[in-house]
Amino acid sequence: MDTPKQYHESINLPDVLSIRSVSELYLKFSDAFQGRDTIVIDIPESAEADLSFVQLIESSRRQAKSDGKTFKLSTPARGSVLKVLERAGFIESFDQEDAKFWLHKEVAL
């Protein structure tokens, strides 16, 4: 009997989220999406991130959306990840969907 892929998987990330770990993280995300419709990413508060990590998250997010899957963060971006988003100019250009994903902010009209 084929069961629906309704369960979600949480992926705990390492403390170093840089160009050196992007390939490994990409494989983790890809493997997780093979068997799940929802993936929740848990970024450690003390994580050190660079722009390649943010790019990986953005590309994974877009791929998940095009595949009809859900990709989200367990907590709002903070620490090093938030600083990368600020320095790279992402936050100023966030739309409602971006703010909800990265900062867990709901925009009220």
Image (tube, rainbow, N blue to C red):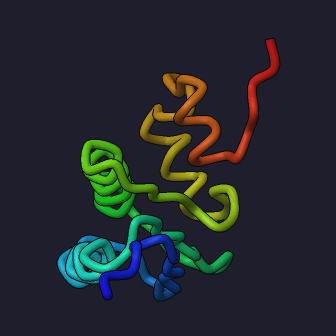
Q: How many marks?
A: 0
Q: Along the horizontal axis of the image, is 12 left or right of 76? A: left
Q: Quadrant of the C terminus?
A: top right
Identify which residue is drawn at 24% across, 76% down: 34
Farthest residue toward the front?
1
Please state which of residues 2 and 46 is positioned toward the viewer in this rendering.
2
Q: Position of residue 25 (x, y in %)?
A: 29, 78
- Quarter occupied by residue 106: top right
Image spot of residue 61 (x, y percent): 37, 51
Q: Is residue 92 above or below residue 101?
A: above
Q: Is residue 99 left or right of residue 56?
A: right
Residue 81 in the image, given as x and y percentages of width and height: 54, 60
For image coordinates 32% across by 53% down, the residue present is 64
Farthest-out residue, top = 109
Which residue lies at the image location 33% right of the left edge and 73% below the top edge? 18
Which of 66/13 is in front? 66
Between residue 76 and residue 79, name the one nearer to us.
Answer: 76
Q: Residue extending furthest right?
A: 108
Location of residue 73 by image quarter: bottom right
Up the image or down, 64 lies above or below 3; here it is above
- Comparing 70 with 16, the one in front is 70
Q: Quadrant of the N terminus?
A: bottom left
Give me the residue at 49% from left, 23% from top: 93
Instruction: Give the x, y percent position of residue 9.
Output: 49, 80
